[in-house]
Amino acid sequence: MHCAARSLIYTPHMPNYRRPNIPGACWFFTVNLLDRKTCLLTDHIEELRAATREIKGRFPFQIDAMVILPDHIHAIWTLPPDDADFSVRWRRIKAIFSKSLPQTEWRSTVRQKRGERGIWQRRFWEHAIRDEEDYRRHVDYCYYNPVKHGYVEEIADWPHSSYHRDVKAGRYPADGRGKIDDDFKFGE
């Protein structure tokens, strides 16, 4: 686990919005579909996996934990030591995934004028992981999220999660019982 000092940079295409610039940091993300009533992510899980693999090959990063739900993603990534640009990775994953789907979604006039698809929310939520306890809580949050939303009763029953990888590697308890706090109200 690596934690670095925070420094902020101004991003001109996002007025009045600052993202932390911490090379090599570990991050928790929530990325949402624009229409939260759809199941695009799980219905097209292979396209999402392919987009993620492609960008991971071009812009390396480590996936510490990830869960794909029908309408949103939670992920924990660690970037390379000399790199802080998680935004380019998400932007390109979203673009590749969107291009793999037929254009059937409703688009606002603004999105039409900009040539944008109506699949993803424009922004995403990010949080720099502060320490080991923060890391553990966010991994638990990722893995518990399908239970929280009522998709399954047990963590192990959700197929679109790195939980299964982590159990096989001995990094997470096989009973799916990490310390799940009742106050998980972050990330969505």
Image (tube, rainbow, N blue to C red):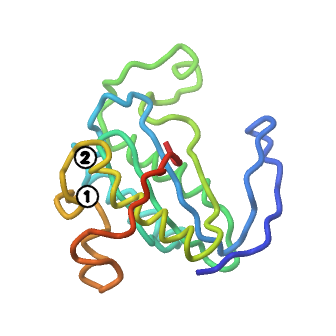
Q: In terms of depth relative to the viewer, which is nearer, 181 or 17?
A: 181
Q: Which mark is residue 26?
A: none
The extreme front residue here reads: 182
Give residue 64's quadrant in the image. Answer: bottom left
Q: In this view, does 118 lie to the left or right of 87?
A: left
Residue 100: percent from the left, percent from the top? 33, 44
Q: Which element is circle 1 on? A: loop
Task: Classify residue 21 by image quadrant.
Answer: bottom right
Residue found farthest to the bottom: 170
- Location of the N terminus (image quadrant): bottom right
The residue that mark 1 highlights is 160
Q: What element carries label 2?
A: helix
Residue 58, how many percent across, how many down? 51, 68
- Give the residue drawn at x 61%, y 77%: 80
In the picture, residue 23 is in which quadrant? bottom right
The percent coordinates of residue 41 (x first, y second) are: 30, 44
Q: Disc 2, disc 1: CB below 8 Å?
A: yes
Say which residue appears at 83% left-offset and 48% top-offset.
10
Q: Residue at x 52, y 54 (%)?
A: 29
For label 2, the crowd category at 10 Å Cα-Cα, with few meaning under 14, some 14 to 19 and many 20 or more, is some
178 sits left or right of 115 in the view = left
Nearest the eye: 82 or 182: 182
Which of these two is toward me, 11 or 16? 16
The disc label shown at residue 42, or none? 2
Q: How many angstroms separate mark 2 from mark 1 (CA)?
A: 8 Å
Label 2 sits on what residue type?
Thr
Give the mark nearest the N terminus, 2 or 1: 2
Residue type highlighted by circle 1: His
Up-down relation of residue 179 to residue 168 (above or below): above
